[in-house]
Image (cartoon, coloured by chain):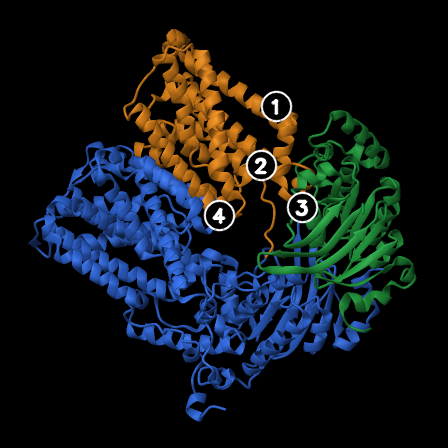
Chain colours: A orange, B blue, C green
Amino acid sequence: MVEYIQIAWQGLVSGFAYALIGLALVMVYKTARILNFAAGTMAGISGFLAHWWAAEQDMPFGVAILFAMIMTGAGTYVVERLTVRPLVKLGDFLPIVIMTLGVEEFLANVSLLWWGGTARRYRVPGDIDRINWLIGDFRLNAWHLVVAITTFVTLSIVGYIINQTELGLGMKAFAEDQDAAKLMGIKESTVSIWTWVLSALVGGVTGIVFAPVLFLQQDYMNIIFIKGFVAAILGGFLSLSGGVAGGLLLGELEAFTIKWAPREFAAALPVVIVFIVLLIRPHGLFTREKGHERV
Amino acid sequence: MSDPIEKSTTALERAKIPLPKFLKKNHYFGFLGILLVYLLAGTYSEYSQTIMNTIIFAIIGASLIVVFGMAGQLTLGHTIFVAAGVFLSANITTVWTRGLETELPIAFGVAFLLGLIVGFPSLRVNELYLALATFAVAFVGVQVLFEWKQFSGGGSGKPVGKLELFGYEFSRGPTLVRIALVLMLITFWIVGNYQDGRTGRSWNALRTSETAARAAGLPVAWLKILCFGIGGGLAAIGGVLYAHTLRYAIPENYGVSLSIIVVLALIIGGKHRLMGAVLGAAFVKWLPELSRDVQEYEGLIYGGTLIILTLIAPDGLVGMFEWLGERVKNLKNGSEDGKTLSADEGTAPLESQYLAPLASSEAKGSLIVRDAAVAFGGVKAVDGVSFEIPAGGVTGLIGSNGAGKTTLFNAITGHVKGATGQFILDGEEISQKPIHNRALSGLGRTFQNLNLHDDLNVLEHALLGLDRNMKYGRIAESFRMPWVLREEKNAHYVAAELLDHMDLLEYWNEKVEDLPYGLQKRVDVVRALATNPSILLLDEPAAGLPTAEALEMMEKVQEYANHISAGVLIIEHNVELVAGVSDRIIVLDAGKTIADGTPEEVTRNEQVIAAYLGT
Amino acid sequence: MSGLSIKDLKVGYGRNEVIHGVDIDVNVGEKVALLGANGAGKSTVLKTISGLLTPTEGTITFDGDEIGGTNPAALVDMGVIQVPEGRRVFPGLNVEDNLKVANYGKSPDLLEEGLETVYKKFPILQERRKQAAGLLSGGQQQMLSLSRAIIAKPKLLLIDEMSLGLAPLLVKEFYEQLGDLFSEDVTLLLVEQNAGLALKYCSRFYVLRNGELVLQSDSANYIDDPTALQSAYLGVDA
């Protein structure tokens, strides 16, 4: 029994990462119909910045995180204005996707040049990632608890912004009906930029909090990006809560597959899931199909 | 008037439309370039590795042109096909100790099948999803390779055996370059043949508008899957060469980053031209050769170049060169457009030897609609409409905004999901068929909001319509067989006459997006007419046109419909126009038929006037 | 001149010109209808005024300012408010959030005041204020759409085809209520296919056909027999 709880907890912890990235992807897709291929790399850079500043530049951990978040926000602002915004006006979305691929290639190499290709493990304050508690036979890693709390706090903040603030209202209105939102006085460029920044900050938090779990390597967030994307597909890509739920579900599925299935299959799991979902429920597991296209 | 000989000139000759030929100018240039490298292959051993890599990337680029450039499916999983080629090659040469004669067909075949599977999601999801789904395929592909140690050798990889062909062993070096060049020639030949043939045209069409491609009778689903199969197979050929170049196959080389690099290379080079594949390959393979500094920043440069090119030259380097070429040409020639037709009077198009055989005295296009209904959510857009149209007649369908006219059209052609009721065309029940099969049964349609293929020119739109009656197969097309050319030539003649009939001949080479609205409407009609339909469904052909222009166009359409004895069903708001051309008018209101009769009867009907004006 | 003044307006989508030079004047506080059959270009004109489309030629001035091509958000700040065709409520947001959106970027106090007004006029909306707007009936959605305009405090109100997809009786009610919902000095340009209704409410009208104005007149001349407009609408003599 304890073994299952242990596996379920492992799955939940990975699921937090997928859920957060899934959320970040859905946010941008929902409001602007753009997939940001650079999301994983951007999150990775945030993680690198924070831990590198803290461990190698002797910055206090909290300050390093704060600076990393500020850099992430500012960097995203610049990226959105310089690369995405000029293309949005053209109305064709393929170039934008290609653009984010270019940004991904660019940023991935910036980070490669900066930190090199080798995996690192930075220490976190108090080495809490090395503290393990035993509760009966159940092993609880302290950092995993930090991960869980951070995820919870992040989701709450995002939930608050979306549901309680005017910006969130604008984002929702914009996601539902762009023209009608414009007619209510909501500025497209304002909503777009803040959606990008918010999405990047969620990604940044994920990058920072998962760095000690995953080893810091130049592309360590790419795998999380893929799985976050699978999470988003599970959730139907248009539902924020669906993305989060999809992430948690994927984490559990994965944890239990590794336990019982051969390794080849466990590795292929995300693609298998994507294919199955696309086949059976292209609109996701948790949302109902809606809308018709008129020709 | 001109003399009889002049009179017999065809529209194609008058417009100077070039006929498809076995070898084009591009072929000679391409062949010369490849020959040059071939002959010089032994003399630059220092660079042979880079040249080899460039050739391999050019082949992979060409395979991507099929998937992405033509069919428009953004795939980020292309490396799994390359990896398939590489590891199959490693296994075949070491385990079976066989040579290229086995490696190439097996690599192509396996990757082709793999492509059909990978292409499957493209049927279900939009392009953004597809990009991510294929991205996931690439990502997971490597992991599966890692774990599948028997096939891949796991993390440490697998050696590649000797370079052999039918038992003859070759030294690598220059011979490998020569073999690679021959394979590149074949690959380019095949891809180029698609570009000139019906398959490439169909891919281009579905890229720009799937809806319209279906309406023209193209099997869009199969074409989409097929592009992945062919693209995958050709990429695997690049993979086999890659295996022999590297001599060692290691899974981690074939991950997401390679997938992205090959796509970036093609986009940087130009995704619609084979030259783009070459330029892109050269760009990513020769740049690092320039200096060590460049090598260090190569990824940065690729990413940066892509960002800049996407902003300023979406068609890549080739697009930039072509644009510059145009500018230079324009400077030289002044503003002369050279599009004027020769002054000779041709035969009237309908009497030309190409359109005359299409004439039919047997009226076609009897359409029975029984209890057609379409509901969106709870709203019944079409609510139990029934009528019968006799073969060969012109029927108008009018009604106020939201009356359900276009929805009824979409129900008949299959463009709307969940329509119920029976549709019988010339005695054949079509209610259950997919869109393109209904088109093949003889439904031709136009679109209210102009569903044209933006990147295609006017002539190609006509040829697309003619696809319905083309017979040559895709394998014959791959190798440019004589009968393929014969049929293509004939289609060009027919298309030209058809354009002439609709007064579009002088614009044959214009991209449709550059045409004024009125002409775009005609192009839409031409595409539908070219399918030689039994019944033509016109959705607001006159909307946005001045009445005189609309009348003129309708006259031409009617003339052609009479020529082929097809029926016409026309939705129109311009009552003046409908009343002028129709034998009969059906009026819809709130999804139901409220009047049905001659134009005089209908325009005097109280209920109709009320529905239009409201009281 | 103050009020709305449109001179030689041409609008197109890409190369496709759908409005071929239209002149419309609406004085401050005047109620004017823009009539025409489906596809005549009425909505295009309205969308151009509200900034969703950019004119290719011609000028649009409001209160003396040139507003052609200004972005919709800035126009909303100036008091140019459109009630879009087909209501366009945000189906996934609840009724109150829909109304909040209409107050976007303005003080919450104004919202309080606006909500009070709206709920007094349409009590059903208050009753259903936590319900998703997509679940409302067509008539209730139209109430919501109009309520958003009330909260936005228009100076120039543009109403696009209120009758679309609603039962005739309901539409009639809305038209009768319009005067009550908005203050007298609001300038109004409404697009309508249903001539009978529009003429009762507006003092003047224009008829658009195929992107050109074919008739303008005082409503009084036609109010008793709107079917006389048929030839202007359809381009055929009855």
Q: CA distance from mark 3 to mark 2?
A: 15 Å
Q: CA distance from mark 4 to mark 2?
A: 25 Å
| Quadrant (top left/top right/bottom left/bottom right) for the C terminus of chain B | bottom right
Q: Spot the residue most to the bottom.
A: B4
Q: Amino acid at mark 4?
A: Asn
Of the two numbered discs 1 and 3 in the rendering, the one whose residue sits closer to the viewer:
3
Label 2 SS: helix
Q: Are marks 4 and 3 on the same chain?
A: no
Please report, as a chain letter, where disc 3 is located.
C
Return the mark for residue C51.
3
- Counting from the top left corner in percent of width and height, residue B310 is at 42, 45
Q: Amino acid at mark 3?
A: Gly
Q: Is C97 placed left or right of A127 in the picture?
A: right
Q: Amino acid at mark 2?
A: Ser
Of the two numbered discs 1 and 2 in the rendering, the one whose residue sits closer to the viewer:
2
Return the mark for residue A189.
2
